[in-house]
């Protein structure tokens, strides 16, 4: 299944994997102004990330109400990130449907590992089989907390990138 061909509907919420359906202005607004992990997210960096990810969007009455993306080789590994449901749409199952749709995506079956980072939504992801890292001593990272932000001063310096 290719991006752009797959859409499922269930009641009033529809899920799409189509890159061209992402409301870039709206999602960039969420991630750069509301999400705790990416304040000041640079627009060009955001668009490059979207273009190179497997994305999922949720729509109600044609308007985007949620977004998530997966960075993946579509063979062994997937990194789930930028999971965001518009405040007014939370608590109605949209986030669960979005994550479930990504986990069920045909290109993401049989992967050896999925990863994510979360400050406080562990319980939300546990229902999909995510657990704490079992051997943290085996994981390493090369982290530049200032990368990807337009504003390189103020709050973005201390932001907790997801
Ligand atoms: C976290 C988030 C994606 C959940 O989406 P949502 O559409 O509100 O969640 P749903 O309605 O699909 O699921 C609700 C269920 O998940 C649980 N849940 C929601 N947010 C949770 C959280 N932060 N921690 C633990 N459980 C959570 C609810 O308790 C509820 O459980 P229930 O079904 O037993 O009642 C959404 O609140 C959000 O976008 N928050 C702001 C951005 C964010 O923190 N994103 C996650 C970054 S890791």
Image (spheres, rainbow, N blue to C red):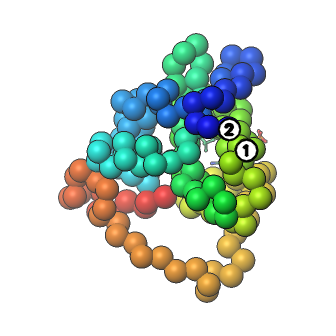
Farthest residue, direction front: 1
Residue 102 locus on image (x, y percent): 67, 44
Q: Quadrant of residue 96?
A: top right
Q: Residue at x 39, y 52 (%)?
A: 38
33 is higher (above) or lower (below) than 90: below
The residue positioned 44% from the left and 43% from the top of the image is 50
Ligand 1 shown in quarter: top right
Q: Secondary structure at mark 2?
A: loop
Left or right of 75? Residue 83 is: left
Q: Is residue 143 above or below residue 128?
A: below
Q: Secondary structure at mark 1?
A: helix
Q: Position of residue 85 (x, y in %)?
A: 56, 35
Residue farthest along the top direction in this orientation: 61
Q: CA distance from mark 2 to mark 1?
A: 7 Å
- Asked if ligand 1 lies within 8 A of label 2, the reply is no
Neighbor class of circle 1 (other Cα within 10 Å; few <14, some 14-19, many 20+) is few
Give residue 95's position: percent from left, percent from top.
Answer: 65, 38
User: Callout 2: few (<14), some (14-19), or many (20+) C-alpha neighbours within 10 Å?
Assistant: few
Q: Is residue 66 visible?
A: no
- Vertical arrangement, residue 92 with respect to residue 76, above or below: above
Residue 30 in the image, given as x and y percentages of width and height:
42, 37
| Residue at position x 58%, y 59% in the image | 73
Do residues under tags 2 and 1 come within 8 Å of each other at their CB atoms?
yes
Q: To which residue does mark 1 refer?
A: 106
* Residue 89 horizontal side relative to residue 46, left or right: right
Of the numbered discs 2 and 1, the one sitting upstream in the chain is 2
Question: Which corner quadrant holds the N terminus?
Answer: top right
Compared to 149, does 47 lie above or below? above
Badge 2 is on which residue?
1
């Amino acid at each position: 299944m290719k991006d752009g061909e797959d859409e499922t509907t269930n009641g009033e919420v529809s899920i799409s994997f189509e890159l061209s359906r992402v409301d870039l202005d709206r999602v960039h607004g969420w991630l750069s102004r509301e999400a705790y992990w990416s304040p000041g997210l640079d627009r060009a960096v955001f668009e490059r990330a979207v273009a190179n990810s497997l994305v999922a969007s949720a729509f109600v009455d044609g308007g985007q109400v949620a977004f998530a993306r997966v960075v993946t080789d579509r063979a062994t590994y997937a990194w789930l990130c930028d999971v965001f449901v518009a405040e007014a749409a939370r608590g109605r199952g949209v986030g669960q449907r979005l994550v479930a749709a990504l986990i069920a995506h045909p290109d993401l079956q049989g992967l050896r590992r999925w990863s994510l980072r979360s400050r406080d939504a562990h319980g939300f992801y546990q229902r999909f089989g995510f657990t704490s890292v079992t051997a943290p001593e085996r994981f390493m990272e090369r982290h530049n907390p200032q990368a990807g932000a337009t504003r390189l001063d103020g709050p973005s310096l201390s932001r907790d990138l997801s």
